[in-house]
Image: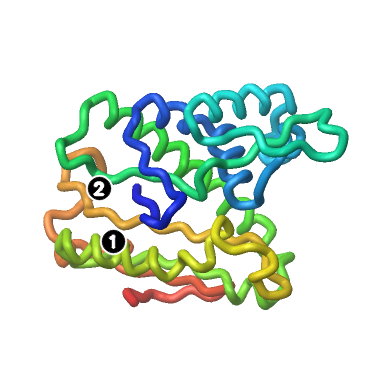
Amino acid sequence: MTTSKAEGYRQVNDAGVLRALAHPARLAILSRLQSEGPATATECAQVTGLSPSACSYHLRTLAKNGLVEEAPPRGDGRERVWRALQRGWGFNEPEDGITPELFEARRAVIDTVLADAAQRLSAYLAQSDREPHEWRAAAWLTHATLLVDAEELRALAERINELIIPYRAAERTGENAPVGARLAEFQLRLFPWAPRGAGGPGAGSAASDSANAGFTAAGSAGSDSTG
């Protein structure tokens, strides 16, 4: 998992910080603060389904790991307001290799991120028939098998990332967004298939296996596609 190299994005290579992030509630809280701005524990409870007191605990844990901090109070200041310290986070492959502890911490946080993303996609699909036509037509799901070398895969990821940066909620204020804009989600997974027998279905060569060779769904229509 990588993030933009833009200012304000944190590369996390500390196993302890990653373990703190590998909790669904903390991940949801941090995402809420990064995408929608400062919030109280009560407001964070709306995205976690937990009590405000439980959210306060998770906010303090995030603060201990340098991910959030207290923001200026609102109104009478009776409830703490919290804000994210970075616009985003991620990690790159260390040049000096990865320790078993860091590998396990990364796996834990990736599993949490993927489960969280799958839940939001499922929630959208469950009510997509009630979405306005323009939003159903704009939604896009695609799955394609690529034949690339490592440099091509890395370059592709960087090109896609550069395209989405201006639209990230953490980068774009409400004043700069068009009328009718709402939070939407971009999910990207680029990875080489594991060799056959090495932890799941894979392929000795991409050309030898046509499973899931291509799928694209725009709105309610789907078709085989590799582009």
**Residue occupying image coordinates x 39% and y 24%:** 16
- Left or right: 41 as drawn, with respect to 214: right
Residue 201 versus residue 154: which sits nearer the camera?
154
- Residue found at the very far right of the displayed protein: 76
What label sits on residue 31 in the rendered view?
none
Q: Marks 1/2: CA distance?
A: 10 Å
Instruction: Give whichever of 158, 216 is nearer the camera.
Output: 158
Residue 112: x, y in percent? 46, 37
Is residue 20 rendered to the left or right of residue 29? left
Label 1 neighbourhood size at 10 Å, few (<14), some (14-19), many (20+)?
few
Q: Quadrant of residue 125?
A: bottom right
Q: Which mark is residue 201?
A: 2
Image quarter in which the C terminus is found: bottom left
Q: Is residue 101 above or below residue 144?
A: above
Name the residue type under label 1: Ala
Tag 2 secondary structure: loop
Residue situated in front as seen by the camera: 62 or 51: 62
Please say if 217 is above or below 193. below
Residue 43 position, x and y percent, is 74, 39
At 21% across and 33% down in the image, what residue appears? Answer: 98
Q: Which residue is mark 1?
A: 211
Please, is residue 47 above or below residue 2 in the view? above
Classify mark 1: helix, strand or loop. Answer: loop
State how the image is colored. Answer: rainbow
Taking the spot 56% from the left edge, 56% from the top edge, the residue there is: 170
How far across and how far down the image is residue 119, in percent?
Answer: 56, 46
Q: Residues within 10 Å of mark 2 (few under 14, many from 20)?
A: few
